[in-house]
Image (cartoon, rainbow, N blue to C red):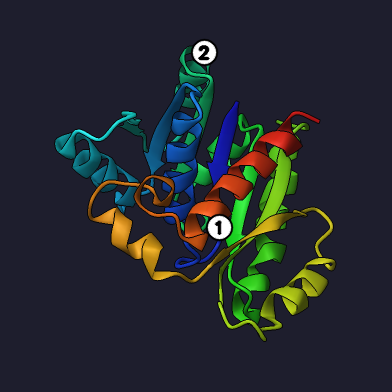
Amino acid sequence: MILLFASQKGGPGKSTAAMNVSVELARLGRDVVLVDADKQRSSARWAEDRAEAGHSPAIACVEKRGKVHTALRELASRYEIVVVDAAGHDSEEARTAMTVADALIAPVRPSQLDLDTLEDLGNVVELARSFNPDLVALGLLSQVGTNSNESESTDAREYMKDYPLFEPLSSVIHFRKAYRDVVAEGLGVVEWTNSKAKAEISVLTAEIIERMQK
């Protein structure tokens, strides 16, 4: 199974989601590899820190650039789950990954500027489906405010109905300090804390796997 995390705009927590979901999958005993397909190397640097610290379970991480579809197919033949962290913009890596991925998870902040990028991303998904008709596109609300009275997520979900190509995930990633704190240690929030962030990643990972088993 190939799970691609990609977006058309930087900053929605794409790498954060990819890294943390990878840790949760490994913690659950799934054979997972994390592919850094972003020139910023956020996932690769995190994986290097994790390996240096000797954290367990180990997370295999490889870097791929350019046309990545052949490499991803090869990795999918060796690993149960391939998690791909692509750039936060339209890129060759994201486009070619979509041609072989089982699911695209598109993190998006609940802001008008971010939500508007779903139109362009949807056009890329439609093109990819001419090569990969089974590609599932999932919308993930990320960096949502933690204020108990916030209505951003509700408003954003309503707005996402204008883009039926994306199936909205029920899970939400909130803007929490825990996500930033664990990165420097090469950890995932599911390993480091019993906070709400840990529960968010556990629920998100379970929902993604459940969606892909339908």
Q: Name the residue at the left extreme.
A: 52
Q: Quadrant of residue 99?
A: top right
Q: Secondary structure at mark 2?
A: helix
* Residue that carries the numbered disc 2 in the rendered image: 77
Tag shown at residue 147:
none
Question: How many numbered discs sit on the rendered protein?
Answer: 2
Position of residue 41 measured from the top left corner of the image (x, y, whole percent): 29, 49
What secondary structure is marked by label 1?
Answer: loop
Residue to which mark 1 is pinned: 7
Q: Is residue 139 left or right of residue 114?
A: right
Give the quarter of the figure containing the C terminus: top right
The amino acid marked with disc number 2 is Ser
User: Which of the pair 168/7 is nearer the observer?
Assistant: 168
Determine crowd level at label 1: few under 14, some 14-19, many 20+ residues with C-alpha closer than 10 A: many
In the rendered image, the vertical position of residue 14 relative to residue 159, given as above or below = above
| Residue for point 40% across, 35% down | 35
Q: Residue furthest bottom?
A: 149
- Seen in the picture, residue 35 relative to 145 is either above or below; the reply is above
Q: Residue at x 53, y 26 (%)?
A: 81
Which residue occupies the extreme top position in the image? 77
